[in-house]
Image (cartoon, rainbow, N blue to C red):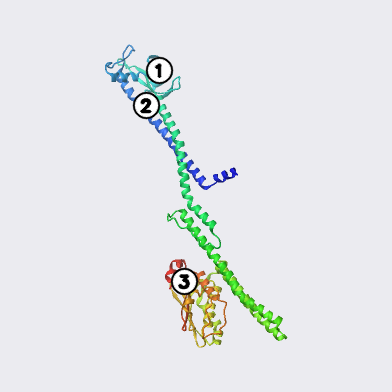
Amino acid sequence: MRFRSARRFSRGLRFRLTASYAVFFAVVLIAVAVLSKGRLESSLDDQTRLTVEQQWAAMKGYLRIQGDRQPRWFFDRNDPDESYIVEQIRRVYMLASADGAPLQWSTVYREDLGFDSPADIRRVLASGRPSWALRQDRRKQPYLIRAGLVYDEEHRRPYYVAIGRSLAPNRAIVRGYTWIFAGIIPLGIFCGSLMGWVAAGRALAPVKEVARAAQRISGSNLSLRIPSREAGDELDYLIETFNRMIERLERNFQQIRQFSTDVSHELRTPITAIRGQLEVALFNAQNTEQYREAALNALQDTERLSQIVRALLLLSRAESGQLALQRARLDVAAVVRDVVEQFGIPAEAAGVRLSTSLPSHCEVTADRVQIERMVANLLSNAVKYTPSGGEVRVSLRRMPPWIELAVEDTGCGIPPQHLPHIFERFHRVPESASQPNREKGLGLGLSFVSWIAKAHGGSVQVASVPGRGSRFSVLLPAPAALSQTAAAQPAAKR
């Protein structure tokens, strides 16, 4: 159990972020330490080289070699500054003749470093240029040596001179610096890890909140939303995406609940009617005619039940996005003209006059089948709710960037309290006194109209005055404005 807990902890995002902080701080501190150490060492060596150069210039002022090959140092021994300078020069010092024979030297040079070889001396004298070398004494202590030549005052004969300075103090400073960083780096890594742990905890707090919210979400609690942090960062984007997902889930659940409610409500009536007809036929029918009448009524209710099921399934598929539109260039004026002609006979039988105001040609990019269904549903309702002697007018006009299809009637109208719900499934306006025996519909036609308009990037509105009639207006995007539909649609709504 402990192993699993430790493994789960080590795989946690907070632990991995903290580990990343620790590695980052370690790499940065080590890189800084290495670069600083190299820079410090180089700076100290450059300073030592400059000091040796200064000593060389001073040595040429104090050292004299006369004709007897005897080097002499000329300085004021009572002057502490000159005495100190000469002492520093002769601490690491060797003078040799042109053939490599040592003439004068310091103890350090003879016992610790050892005399330079005649070959090296001749090479320096032959080049005529100063030579720099890094040498170690018997204790492995480094020395920086500058070698060159000087001339005697009488015959101008060349002599080999080497002076130097120990680099041990420089290396001691570098070692001290290294030990300081050896203590700072673990402390820095610890502080960086602590800061990383705290920062990761704060950064992941919204993620944990999202996770806790997701655990609280259920079919009955889909209204839950996570408030934005107003930081404009990736976590706010995650919260926004999560909230949008919950909104989609809520809509889908509502559709499912609505579908279940609609099915149970709408199927109950025809099923009850079918059962009643069959029970009447079973218990009360006396002859073949009564049995036939009961079977005919049951068959009619069965057909109505079948229509409801088909319409519900089609509408549910449409609203859930499973019904794909087959978009193509379409002359909507010709489509409306054809549908109006189909309703000519039913309108004439109902005593309703149909009139149109259509352009000769009007193109949209749309699904022909769905546009025909939309126009047919609007005309069916208009004819059904218009009394004999009334009129239904169909018009089509361009309103850039939209095309408006309007169906107006002089029927009974819709009471104001029903207008907000007119496009909901199975919503029916109560019967009016002027049309008490009109045929009842399924209550799904206007729901189809609303979906078809929205699926094409448009909208549908209704205006109605009870007793005077209704006007349904469908706005569809014109082909040239399809790319700007989302931006223009709010301004087009009335």
Residue type, mark 3 in image: Ala
| Residue that badge 3 annotates | 478
Q: Which residue in the protein does label 1 denote?
A: 108
First in residue order: circle 1 vs circle 3: 1
Which residue is pictured at 49% across the width and 85% down the height?
391
Check disc 2 and give the amino acid type.
Thr
Extreme residue toward the front, this view: 283
Q: Where is residue 223 drawn, in percent x and y? A: 51, 62
Mark 1: few/some/many CA within 10 Å (<14, 14-19, 20+):
some
Identify the image quadrant of residue 164.
top left
Q: Which residue is mark 2?
A: 48
User: How far apart are labels 1 and 2 at the CA level?
Assistant: 18 Å
- Residue 340 point in image, percent of width and height: 53, 81
Instruction: Say which quadrant the C terminus sits in.
Output: bottom left
Say which of 347 and 94 sits in front: 347
Q: Nearer the viewer, mark 1 or mark 3?
A: 1
